[in-house]
Image (spheres, helix red, strand yellow):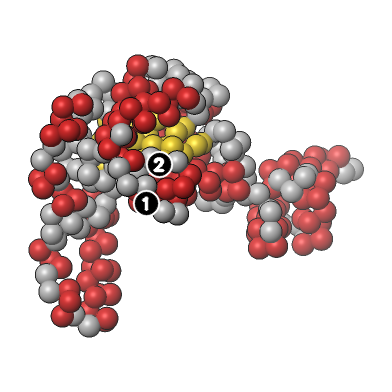
Amino acid sequence: TSGEVGAATMAGWVARTSLSPAQEKFVDVESLPTERANPRSRGLHQKSVGQLVKLFVAEEKENVRALRKAAGEIGRAAGFVAAALRRGGRLFYVGAGTSGRLGVLDASEMPPTFHADPEEVQAILAGGPEAIFRAQEGAEDDAEAGARAVRERRIGGKDVVVGLTASGRTPFVHGALRQAVRARAKTVLVTAHPHWAPEKSVAMIRMGRVHDNLMVHVVPSNEKLRARAVRLVRLLTGVGPSEAAGALGRGGGRVMDALRLLKNAKVRRP
């Protein structure tokens, strides 16, 4: 696909609109941006490894350009996702194939990175868990399965559903979005389709899960992350490694709790 359209995730509102069942069934697949060849990548089979890498790197600027154009929509979506999560709502990614797997990846990163409850950010993948590792043929074309997944999770007015579909037409995603609208949930579509006129981890920043540019809600579940947590406490307080590690131990491994303990200890000192 062309770099400016197919390679970048361009974001767009889905409020009360999505493809109708008839449009899903008879959509002109060949007209979709994801089905077009990128004219700048002609002759790939004749290029050296160095030339291929240079081309791939050069195409990244198209991603940046597309994201700049969508910055306003991304900001709006991130804002209401953050508001929903503050009210106790949930965020659901819905997708198929690679797009859906990216939703699974992002959702799975929320608990260890931001100490989010696993129920807070979830992913719905066409074909179920098996589709993470092996393609489930035809799953993306089942709009009713998308709607059913939304009903089964009792998605409602406090929640946000983000549809992920590079082509913009995946029936499973649109079925889920239509059902989400019926349930009065907020809906967002993330797509590479240029005519769909956005995305999340920014919401975690707005919720206070990041201090300055530091991910202070990291879960120290392994040696690398425990060392990172100690560094974060030292960086934010100026204490030594032993004191930082001790505060983390008393705070259950939570950086922010360790910071509060150290702050309170400092206040109590004569």
Q: Nearer the viewer, residue 8 or 237?
A: 8
Q: Report x, y in % for residue 46.
A: 15, 80
Q: Residue at x 26, y 68 (%)?
A: 56
Secondary structure category for the residue under label 2: loop
Q: Residue at x 17, y 42 (%)?
A: 194
Mark 1–mark 2 Cα distance, whole angstroms, equals 8 Å
Q: Residue at x 37, y 23 (%)?
A: 180
Residue 183 found in image quarter? top left
Q: Nearer the viewer, residue 107 or 79?
A: 107
Number of residues whose C-alpha sits closer than 10 Å to that of mark 1, classed few (under 14), some (14–19) or many (20 or more): some
Judged left or right of residue 229, residue 23 is: left
Q: Report x, y in % for residue 42.
A: 11, 70
**Above or below 52: residue 93:** above
**Above or below 64: residue 87:** above
Amino acid on which the number 1 mark rests in the picture: Ala
Q: Which quarter of the image is occupied by the N terminus?
A: bottom left
Residue 135 - label: 1
Residue under numbered circle 2: 127
Amino acid on which the number 2 mark rests in the picture: Gly
